[in-house]
Amino acid sequence: MAVSFSTAPFVWQHRQRRPVWRQQALIAARTHTDYQHEDHAESRDGRRSHSPPGHGRGFSYVVATGLSARPAPGSIETRLARAVRRWAVPRDVRDRTPPLPPSAEAIAEALDHFARYCATCHANDGSGEAPIGQALFPRAPDMRQAPTQDLTDGELFYIIEYGVRFTGMPAWGDGSPKGEELGWKLVHFIRHLPKLTPEELNRMESENPKPPQ
Ligand code: HEC
């Protein structure tokens, strides 16, 4: 097959970064009508991009926008990604409830864990205002706000345990009962984020990983 000028970047990106391509294709394929009405087919310098024949809008979207994580995701992209994610969480998991209460001990343990392992992306206060969290695509969200707080406990647990594919959010669970217990404690901590006290923030700072001297 002859590689034309307009398909060359796609072929290169396809070889290098297949998972990203698949994510964009999935999102675009599920929602092609939305993309049709948006300016996503327009390349940055205003030229119309030509999609490789027969490859659908997922490809033209990647060719038009590139794979850089630098631009802030648009509100449509964010909304669609969240909708796809919601659809991906099994219903029985979504309806699960924490097997342990939000005791002071549970929250304290999760607070330390969050400061050590999660704050690099999510920031101690859950705002996502951390250098790594702000450079990811999609960005680490402000977990104190409604879009996160309105998720069910089961959805939060599932995200922590399994991660979110194609995003920077890693899977933390190892399937063990101990790991699941910690996952539920972290769910309680995420509910607690909007009420963090200055003392708790101080304690988290002392737990944050230190850069090498
Ligand atoms: C390497 C960066 C990174 C680390 C470390 C990380 N996360 Fe995330 N997290 C993300 C990103 C990016 C998202 C947004 C994913 C999306 O948009 O679907 C996210 C999303 C989430 C969400 C869903 C919130 C929402 O509204 O979408 C929860 C809950 C969460 N993370 C909890 C945690 C916990 C708990 C830890 C530590 C055990 C952690 N994360 C560590 C990057 C990270």
Image (tube, rainbow, N blue to C red):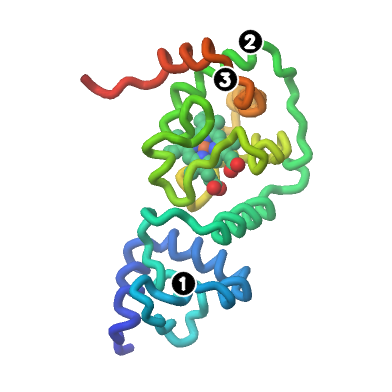
Q: Residue at x 44, y 22 (%)?
A: 116
Q: Nearer the viewer, residue 179 or 146?
A: 146
Residue 212 numbered mark, or none: none
Q: Residue at x 41, y 31 (%)?
A: 120
> Which of the two labelled residues, at mark 2 and mark 1, occupies the earlier sequence position?
1
Q: Which residue is mark 3?
A: 110
Say what secondary structure mark 3 lies in. helix
Quadrant for residue 193, please give it: top right
Q: Residues within 10 Å of mark 3 (few under 14, many from 20)?
A: many
Residue 61 numbered mark, or none: 1
Residue 105 numbered mark, or none: 2
C-alpha distance separating marks 2 and 1: 48 Å
Left or right: 179 in relation to 66: right
The amino acid beneath tag 2 is Glu
Quadrant for residue 49, please give it: bottom left
> Which of the two labelled residues, at mark 3 and mark 2, occupies the earlier sequence position?
2
Q: Nearer the viewer, residue 138 or 25?
A: 138
Q: Residue at x 53, y 30 (%)?
A: 126
The amino acid beneath tag 3 is Ala
Q: Nearer the viewer, residue 205 or 118?
A: 205
C-alpha distance separating marks 3 and 2: 9 Å
Q: Position of residue 36 (x, y in %)?
A: 57, 77
Whether residues under marks 3 and 2 lie with C-beta atoms below 8 angstroms apart, the answer is no
Q: Position of residue 131 (x, y in %)?
A: 37, 37
Say what secondary structure mark 1 lies in. helix
Q: Residue furthest left?
A: 213
Query: For disc 3, does the CB lie below 8 Å from ligand 1?
Result: yes
The amino acid beneath tag 1 is Tyr
What quarter of the picture does the N terminus occupy? bottom left
Left or right: 130 in relation to 94: left
Say what secondary structure mark 2 lies in. helix
